[in-house]
Image (cartoon, rainbow, N blue to C red):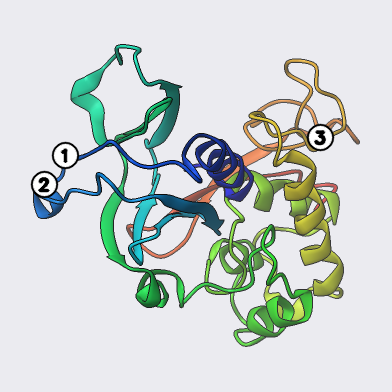
Amino acid sequence: MPEGDTVWYTARRLHEALAGRVLTRSDFRVPRFATTNLAGQTVMEVVARGKHLLIRTDAGLTVHTHLRMDGSWRVRPAAERLRDSHRIRLLLTNADWQAAGYLLGVTEVLPTAQEDRVTGHLGPDLLGPDWDAAEAVRRLRADPGRPVAEALLDQRNLAGVGVIFATEMLFLRGIDPWRRVGDVEDLGALVDLGQRLLGANKTRLEQVTTGDTRRGREVWAYGRAGRPCRRCGTVIKRGEQGPPGQERLRFWCPNCQK
């Protein structure tokens, strides 16, 4: 699932292509909104809220999308023929550009005044103007017995962290993914690290946490199961964590994250 930095980058690209321009066509390829027509409306802005994308128009409407596991947006010139059109769930076009949403996990339209219905549950956004580290720490501490990796991925605590950044945050702070939140000595430093990592990656497509952008050197632990730890040489472990049916992958160094 794309993480907060990827969604922020996608929002910026959509904003550049759509904001301030009149829509000449909208094509919702989901049954519930198949007859919705936004043609003639001006897109005011496109913003990210955690992993949610919000496209707001001057008619007081918001197009809410979520990429989930397989979704993506592509921006192309308006006259260009799009590929893989059978995978498109939403198409927004103006005189210059067309934005196509592929395999979107969520596609819906709602009044802008009611956006809280879909984003009101989210915690502070690590890349948003509402970022509040103290509030994120307060929310994490509300369940001190929960494994810290699970708590970081709960968007109600802080919005935007996914498996990649949770893995790298915990590695860099030397914290075992199964350690209880209440046993983490400095949650403030942990969430501050997350905010800095996402901020450093929000203007590029690939996540880099090591500072080395060369292929195969970008991350410390994520996706490196069975390979030696870059710090101590211990074999990186892989496991699953979470309630039944909601398990998520974990990668960690047994030596660096005792």
Label 1, on which residue? 29
Name the quadrant of the C terminus: bottom right
Q: Is residue 187 left or right of residue 50?
A: right
- Could you tell me if the residues under marks 1 and 2 are in contact, i.e. CB atoms within 8 Å? yes
How far apart marks 1 and 2 lie (CA) works out to: 6 Å
Q: Are marks 3 and 1 in contact (CB under 8 Å)?
A: no
**Front label number (3 vs 1):** 1
Q: Pinpoint residue 9: horizontal percent, then vertical percent.
A: 61, 40
Residue hosting label 2: 34
Q: Secondary structure at mark 1?
A: loop
Q: Residues within 10 Å of mark 3 (few under 14, many from 20)?
A: some
Q: Are marks 3 and 2 in contact (CB under 8 Å)?
A: no
Answer left or right for 5 relative to 21.
right
- Residue at numbered disc 3: 234
Q: CA distance from mark 3 to mark 1?
A: 49 Å
Tell me the residue at 15%/45% (across/down): 30
User: Which of the two discs, 3 and 2, labels the residue nearer the N terminus?
Assistant: 2
> Residue at horizontal 18%, vertical 48%?
37
Disc on the earlier residue, 3 or 1: 1
